[in-house]
Structure formats: C-alpha cells, structure tokens
Image: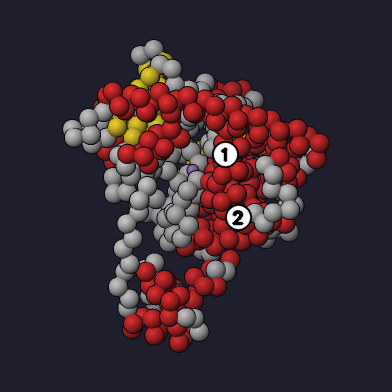
Amino acid sequence: MRKIWRIKDPDPAIQNELSSALKISKITAQLLANRGISDLREAGSFLQCSLTSCHDPFLLKDMDKAVYRIKQAVSGGEKILVYGDYDVDGMTGVAIIYSALKNLGANVSSYIPNRLEEGYGLNSGAVKRAERDGVNLLITVDCGISSFREIEYANSLRMDVIVTDHHEILESRVPAAYAVINPLQEDCKYPFKHLAGVGIAYKLAKALYENTPFFAEDFLDLVSLGTVADIVPLIGENRVLAKHGLGELNKRHRVGLRALMKVGGLEGKDISSGHIGFILGPRINAMGRIGSPQKALELLLSEDEDLALKLAKTLDTENRNRQKIEGKVLDEALSKVEREVNFKHHQVIVLASENWHAGVIGIVASRIADRFYRPTILISMDGKVGKGSGRSVENFHLFEYLLRCKDSLMGFGGHESA
Ligand SMILES: [Mn+2]
C-alpha cells in the first residue's frame, strides 16, 4: 500500500526548551512534542521510563476491597478460582494472579474457557462446576465486566466474585460483583486508562505483595508479553511495563517461555516487541483459537524443562493448523467481499458463513479491515445463532455502533476498535 507522509510543522519554542533542559537534540525534542509531550516533567519521565513512575495500584477503584477479600480467603484456606480469557492477555494475567496466590499460600486453581464450546467471558456452566468444587471466591482476569447474569448466578450460589477487566463498560453499569477493578469505570481515579488485562492483573499482584517478601516485578516478562500482544497503546505506564518486561523476557528465566523461544527459533536472539507480536503471541493465541487454552497456560506456569518443550511443540503445531484454517477462511471471505459488498453503499463490511471456524474470524476480519479500510465484522453461523468478531478503523468506535444495535444482539462486548 502506498502511504502518504505528512510532516508536522516544527515548534521552535518547545524544541529549545526541551533540548536545553533535558540535553537532547532538537529533533528528539520535536518528536516528543509530536507525541503530545511538551511539558518538561512529562518529557523527563518519558525519557527515563522508570518503574517508579508507575501509579499506586490502590488508586484503582475497589483494589482495597479486593485485596482485603483475597487475603481473608488465603488465611481462611478458602478455595479460589482464577478465571481468565483465552487470549495472550488473559492467559498471561491468569498466570500472574495464580502464581502470586500460590506464593502467598492460597488454595488456588485456574480456569480458561474453551472459545468454541463456552465462548467469551464467564459462563454459568463453569460457575456451577466451580461451586461444586467448593470454590468460594472467583477472580476474573481480562473478562467479566459484561457477565451480569453469570455474576448474579455466582452470588446466588454464595460465591464472591472479583472482576478485573479492561474492556468497555456497557452504559455505565457494572455487574454486582464483590469488587470491580476496571480503570474505565467513571468513578475510578486511576490516572492511566489504557492498561491491558494483564496490566491490571499485575497491579493486583503488586497490591497483594505489599508487605510480603515477594516482588511483583518478577512477573514483568508476562506483562510485556500480554500487553504487546493485546495491542493496547504503548504509551504511559504500558510503555514502561513493556520496556522493563522486555528486559525480563531477555533474561529467559521462565522455563515455559524459554522453551517457546527455542521452538520459535529465537534462541540467542534479543527478544523485541516484534518477536512477541509475530512469534510468541500467535503461538500462545493459537491454543485459545483452535486448541485447548489450558495447555498454553500450563506452558506459562511450567517449571519442568521436558514438559515445557513438549507443550511448546504442541503450540507450534497448533499455530500451523491455525494458519491453514485462517488462509481458507480469508480466501472465502475475500470472494464474498467481491460478490456481496458494494463499496458505494456499504460503509461497513459484514459477512457470514456456516463454514468459518469461529476461532479465526477475528484475525481474518482484521486482515480485511486493513485491506479495504472499512470496519469489518465476520460471523460464524451455527444453525440460527451466529458468533461474530469485528475489527474497526480509526475514528469508528465499533463498540458504540454495536451498542446501537444491541436489541438485535444476544450479547456483545469489547473495545473501541475490536
Ligand atoms: Mn485484553
């Protein structure tokens, strides 16, 4: 695709101020200004990119309540279930909360639903099974903010639910959970609103670890993995966490990730965000799309070299299968675009088929949205019910447009652009 470059007009006043105070070149100063960073303090902390610039986790609404309830559960030996989404962001977040709770001596287990059989978010079947297993406290990671009914149901079974999520909030309403940690809540004072699900999980671990001998920073490799893979904007705190996390990733101290790097041909290489986006992330995601996500989580948590290598190879194979399935769906979708879409009349591309694997429609939608620069929704039909996944383009708030059609939808959730 041909790109049109438009260069911003320079601002000599800001250039002079930043370059002389921070001893940087005028070009660097202008680049900062172009990113909207024009005051000295902000520019200084951007350049330093220090972990100490991260905000206090207790600024998150309900963090104190959540920590209180979790500590009560740990000391009382209550069963805790960490329930997360099946993407990289969700699985890395579950790995963090699960490990943190294990370290604190909790009676904890984890659960990642199957995308095809159970779908996104909490489901009542899983809640019921948790209750039968004696779970008293359920913590969601990267999901839960739109699981109103399932949380009511958990409450009716006398199970407390703590929601940690970063997805959009439906019409300012949150579920009736014991605590809801999501910086997008209107009355949440947390200054940074773009944390990934794993970023919020990290904040919870950080809060739980206060006054203990453990360091939440040990989880930064997982934080960078989930943050980069979830494509949240790498600004503010996300940039700090991703940068320090990449440093941790490069130490290769996590057995499972070391095995995944080996299988992905990254041995001896300096791991970059590109490697997360194109090599590590897709292999972990593949399990959530077409395989069993629990295996990817097992890999993240593994402490056994042989088992980790075996699991990493499974992820690699599933990723190849995912690519094949995706290629087929993309071909079919493109020929549908040719037949069904009239670019003069249709602002949004919406396509449906009985043949499409629901695990890959999101990635295919994003390829089509890129190619035609139109918001795109692909729907995988199963009888009368369809599951769709959409990707948007700049300045088209997909979530808000879906909100306008909510009467014809059985359920939906997500972000501005996906
Ligand atoms: Mn996420």
First-in-chain label (2 vs 1): 2
Residue 70 in view of the camera: no
> For mark 2, does the 10 Å Cα neighbourhood hold few (<14), some (14 to 19), or many (20 or more) residues?
few
Q: Residue 190, image x and y in percent?
A: 44, 59
Q: Quadrant of residue 263?
A: top right
Farthest residue to the left: give it.
Answer: 345
Q: Which mark is residue 282?
A: 1
Residue under the point 61% across and 37% down: 283
For this view, does 368 lie left or right of residue 99? left
Residue under the point 52% across and 60% down: 239
Residue under the point 47% across and 81% down: 25
For label 1, the SS is helix
Q: Quadrant of residue 410?
A: top left
Amino acid type of the residue tagged 1 in the rendering: Pro
For label 2, the SS is loop
Q: Which mark is residue 272?
A: 2
Colouring mode (rainbow / by chain / secondary structure / one colour) = secondary structure
Q: Nearer the viewer, residue 139 or 368?
A: 368
Q: Residue 45, image x and y in percent?
A: 50, 73
For this view, does 244 lie left or right of residue 359? right
Q: Nearer the viewer, residue 262 or 399?
A: 262
Marks 2 and 1 sit apart, C-alpha to C-alpha, by: 15 Å
Vertical arrangement, residue 16 with respect to residue 98, above or below: below
Residue 333 in view of the camera: yes
Q: Residue 318, image x and y in percent?
A: 62, 29
